[in-house]
DNA sequence: ACGTTTTGCCAAAACGTTTAATCACAAGCC
DNA sequence: GGCTTGTGATTAAACGTTTTGGCAAAACGT
């Protein structure tokens, strides 16, 4: 208890306390602590100020700083419904870590999916009141969306959707390429009869994955066979029923590409009930790399991962770029950025020998 | 394009703009907009100010307000590794929604699990620099933890662990009761030979679930049978191996309580390989209600849910209470708050008839 | 020794609010 | 008619920084 440490209960030490203790002006303190360029201070005082600041346990008040510099070093993350998608946490994580890298902090607000546009606008406003330097608007996947117009007053980027007005830069997963790669993987393993168990409800992702599937076939020189393209509800049960149908034919496919990992789980059950072994009798692949399914299932599921983390990181990275170049070059970004969806190889694909 | 709307590009309207436009002082504007008590303003001017403010699209600058009132209306969420636990998103969500309810916003910082105590302290400091009104420290489950000492300078609560110094209020899931309830459910269904497939690595949760299991047995009047208590790695494969062992005996259990849902998945596979049907031949239950496993598996898994959302909400609720009563009653909270883990009944339990 | 530059530092004005302290004025009371 | 009391609004001082524009003194060149 000899207590070389500073008192725990410190009555808030401000920049002038430091100045007084160091025998200089607050101006000087500010300059040396911020290493303000084009400013001159002797090495001696610099050291003194710094050590005094440390001893006193000075921490700047960022509100005050922000007030003066009109920059809060905060970026706002506006998510519509984190709840629905379990991987959304990865978006937050990616954004957070990239933000930390730039010495920014993340303020998050979650809009309910069913809340109207007004609620969303109010949320955007709340962020702006806090003087955030920029806003990330993260959506569950839509094709296009019209961003709250308050977002036009501040640098903004969009995750998971296109801005209808085409003014806010957007980032999306390149689902098509991911799907094509997956098909290529199967084709390389000698599969020619590759079925696609699509989701029956129409969202951008289904389109992307379907075109990727078709592109993959084409690139592998496999003719399209509509008999092998089916769809069901995008849950385990949907995968079960469609796979049951697919695998019960005499000319059954040697591989099934499921719209997502949950459907793949259903496919596993179907195969099992029919006495087919995975991957020896039939290869199965999914999409999403949904933790913890893909790794926990037996055999572990080969699938493709969505770049949630990367999209979050991309968002704050381009946002900071946008903020820097702010008034200078304001560009309409017509094309969205597509981030790759890497295929992750596990155990559910085998060489085809039929 | 008749544009009754306010200009999109507004050069920042402040409180004095409103004052000028309404022909009153900024004081008055502040008073009416904040509905400051003990202050007198005529109905007429109040209306005028409000309408002018709306027309001008005035949004207060919260930084400035915070500077003056020394309260930021932000609460900091310090999570150690959101990544590892997929449900952690629910904590954030719960905290966020409760925060919204109190007109607070959430600033989040994520510390890496492997980052040292110093990094954690720096993160806490970053939050404090931002003048957050309080801090939530959310951990993956530990038994005890010593919170960064900067947290002692500001109202704080702890999620998922106990403060070693016993000064920070904490909230934890009541795993034991959840486990006991689950055993009660099995006992009510006529099961007497209930196995427990524990996790072999020792964390607080394993303890809690084990004591819950034992308590449940006791309350059901079932004698403890150590033959039925096994353990394995807390993954699907661990559940598989232990269940294989359990189910291959002549006096095999009629129900298996798995440490978590992932192990339950492994148990499913073991049962299947042995030709046992779930739940007819053997009932299986898990723990965590881990999306999307529990609902996607066939048959859907009966399990118990962790109150992540509720803990997040509890945290900001008690934090606000703490902030209000701040200087007045500062209490050492010796006992942690335990939040119930509800069992969610699905399809993997059947009446026992052996 | 005298101008000029360089060096080291500082005073004061912002930034956009809230709030304590007043103030002008009308009304009420005897 | 003077004294108090209420009413509606204002003035000015914070809050803790950053930043502009300077100003003395020292160093320098001749």
Image (spheres, coloured by chain):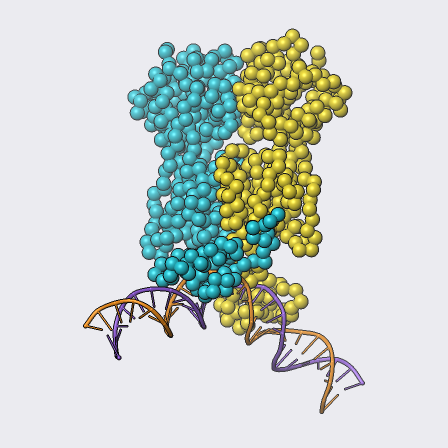
Chain colours: A cyan, B yellow, C purple, D orange
**Residue B126 in the image: above or below residue D3:** above
The residue located at (69%, 30%) in the rendering is B177
Q: Position of residue A175 (x, y in %)?
A: 39, 32
The residue located at (58%, 56%) in the rendering is A10
User: Is residue A236 in view?
Assistant: yes
Q: Position of residue A236 (x, y in %)?
A: 52, 24
Q: Nearer the viewer, residue B208 or B219?
A: B208
**Residue A22 in the image: above or below residue A205:** below
Q: Nearer the viewer, residue A145 or B69?
A: B69
The residue located at (40%, 48%) in the rendering is A319
The residue located at (66%, 25%) in the rendering is B210
Q: Position of residue B20 (x, y in %)?
A: 50, 71
Q: Quadrant of the C terminus of chain B?
A: top right
Relative placement, left or right, of B324 versus A327 is right
Q: Nearer the viewer, residue A137 or D18?
A: D18
Relative placement, left or right, of D27 versus B192 is left
């Amino acid at each position: 208890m000899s207590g070389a440490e500073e008192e725990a209960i410190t009555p808030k030490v401000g920049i002038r306390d430091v100045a007084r203790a160091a025998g200089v002006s607050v101006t000087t303190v500010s300059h040396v602590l911020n290493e303000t360029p084009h400013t001159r201070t002797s090495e001696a005082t610099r050291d003194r100020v710094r050590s005094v600041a440390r001893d006193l346990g000075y921490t700047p008040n960022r509100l005050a700083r922000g007030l003066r510099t009109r920059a809060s070093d905060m970026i706002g993350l506006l998510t519509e419904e984190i709840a629905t998608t379990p991987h959304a946490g990865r978006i937050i994580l990616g954004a957070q870590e990239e933000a930390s890298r730039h010495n920014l902090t993340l303020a998050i607000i979650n809009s309910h999916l069913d809340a109207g546009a007004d609620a969303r606008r109010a949320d955007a406003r709340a962020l702006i009141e806090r003087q955030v330097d920029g806003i990330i608007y993260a959506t569950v996947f839509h094709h296009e969306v019209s961003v709250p117009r308050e977002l036009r007053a501040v640098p903004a980027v969009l995750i998971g959707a296109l801005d209808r007005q085409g003014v806010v830069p957007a980032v999306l997963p390149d689902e098509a390429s991911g799907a094509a790669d997956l098909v290529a993987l199967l084709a390389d393993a000698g599969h020619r009869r590759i079925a696609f168990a699509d989701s029956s409800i129409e969202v951008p992702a289904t389109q992307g994955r379907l075109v990727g599937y078709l592109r993959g076939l084409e690139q592998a020189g496999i003719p399209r066979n509509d008999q092998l393209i089916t769809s069901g509800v995008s849950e385990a049960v949907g995968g079960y029923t469609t796979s049951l149908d697919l695998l019960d034919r005499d000319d059954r496919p040697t591989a099934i590409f499921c719209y997502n990992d949950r459907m793949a789980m259903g496919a596993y059950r179907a195969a099992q009930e029919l006495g087919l072994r995975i991957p020896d009798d039939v290869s199965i692949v999914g999409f999403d790399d949904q933790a913890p399914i893909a790794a926990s299932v037996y055999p572990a599921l080969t699938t493709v991962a969505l770049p949630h983390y990367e999209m979050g990181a991309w968002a704050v990275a381009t946002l900071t770029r946008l903020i820097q170049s702010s008034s200078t070059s304001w560009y309409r970004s017509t094309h969205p950025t597509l981030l790759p969806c890497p295929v992750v190889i596990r155990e559910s694909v085998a060489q085809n020998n039929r």
